[in-house]
Structure formats: C-alpha cells, structure tokens
Amino acid sequence: MSETAPDCIFCKIVAGEVPADVLGRSDHALSIKDLNPQAPFHALVIPVEHHDNAAASAAADPASIGHLVVLADEVARDSGNADYRLVVNTGAGVGQTVFHTHVHVLGGSAHLSERL
Ligand code: 5GP
Ligand code: ZN
C-alpha cells in the first residue's frame, strides 16, 4: 500500500531499474509490451503508484483506474488497434502473477488468447 514496494518487478520497471519496451507514459502510468504476449498486440498499463491490485488502487484513488484506461486507449490506437480488450486479473486464483496493479491491453485476434 506504499508508493513503491521492495522487490516488485513493476515498481522496478517504472523506476527504470529493469528494462522494458515502453509504448507510452503519462504522469500517472507507464505502458510497456508484455514479455510473454497472449495476442498480436499485448501491452500492459501500470500505475506509477504501487498497489497490489486494481481494487486497492481504486480504493486509494478512484481516478487512478481512469488514468489507466486513458493510456490503454492511447497505446492501442497508436498501434493501429482501435478495437481491443482490457483484462484485469485480481488474485492468484484467476492467474494474477504480478501483485502491482496492471491492465492488459489485447488487440488483434485477442479473443483467441488461451491465458487471458
Ligand atoms: P498477470 O498474470 O499478473 O495478470 O500478468 C502479469 C503479466 O506481466 C504477464 O502477462 C507477464 O508476461 C508480464 N510480465 C511479468 N514480468 C514482466 C517483465 O519483467 N517485463 C514485462 N514486460 N512483462 C512482464
Ligand atoms: Zn510495485
């Protein structure tokens, strides 16, 4: 529930300590290519501020989720994917593996994805 969390891979990417393919950024969030894409276009949108999941981010600041959607739309359109899916996993039981809030942006044949 702090601004950054030790040993969080997405906090390290936001801080520039771990490299990533950056697709876009705003004052509130960073968008990167997913390391293991599940669709022809697969980006992640990550808030700068660390919370474990989207509900925790929303509880701290409801607008934080809106900021993620705005950047998701921007990077999807910039990559020629005006139609896209947003996926937000909450909890290990549905496959959340990184416990720093993030939105998956899936474009192309995203409906064929097996994992998301
Ligand atoms: P989750 O399963 O938690 O919803 O999604 C986590 C996503 O983060 C996965 O799709 C995984 O491929 C991606 N991911 C995990 N570690 C890294 C990393 O170090 N760099 C990038 N670009 N993506 C990562
Ligand atoms: Zn983090």
Image (spheres, helix red, strand yellow):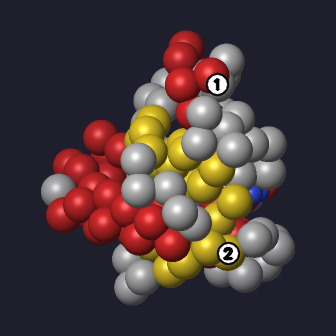
Specify the amino acid type for callout 2.
Val
Q: Is residue 47 above or below residue 28?
A: above
Residues at discs 1 and 2 in contact (Cβ within 8 Å): no
Give the quadrant of the N terminus: bottom left
- Helix, strand or loop at label 1? It is loop
Q: Residue lying furthest left in this view?
A: 62
- Residue for point 32% across, 58% down: 69
Badge 2 crowding class, 10 Å Cα cut-off, few under 14, some 14 to 19, many 20 or more, is some
Q: Residue lying furthest top in this view?
A: 93
Earlier along the polypeptide chain: callout 1 or callout 2? 2
Q: Give how far across and how far down residue 30 sits, in percent.
A: 53, 72
- Residue for point 69% across, 60% down: 33
* Quarter of image, ligand 2: bottom right
Which residue carries the number 1 mark? Answer: 113
State the residue in front, 60 or 93: 93
Badge 1 crowding class, 10 Å Cα cut-off, few under 14, some 14 to 19, many 20 or more, is few
Give the side of residue 30 with respect to residue 58, left or right: right
Q: Give how far across and how far down residue 2 sits, in percent.
A: 44, 63
Which numbered mark, 1 or 2, is in the foreground of this view? 1
Which residue carries the number 2 mark? Answer: 22
Specify the amino acid type for callout 1.
Ser
Which of the labelled discs sits on residue 88, or is there none?
A: none
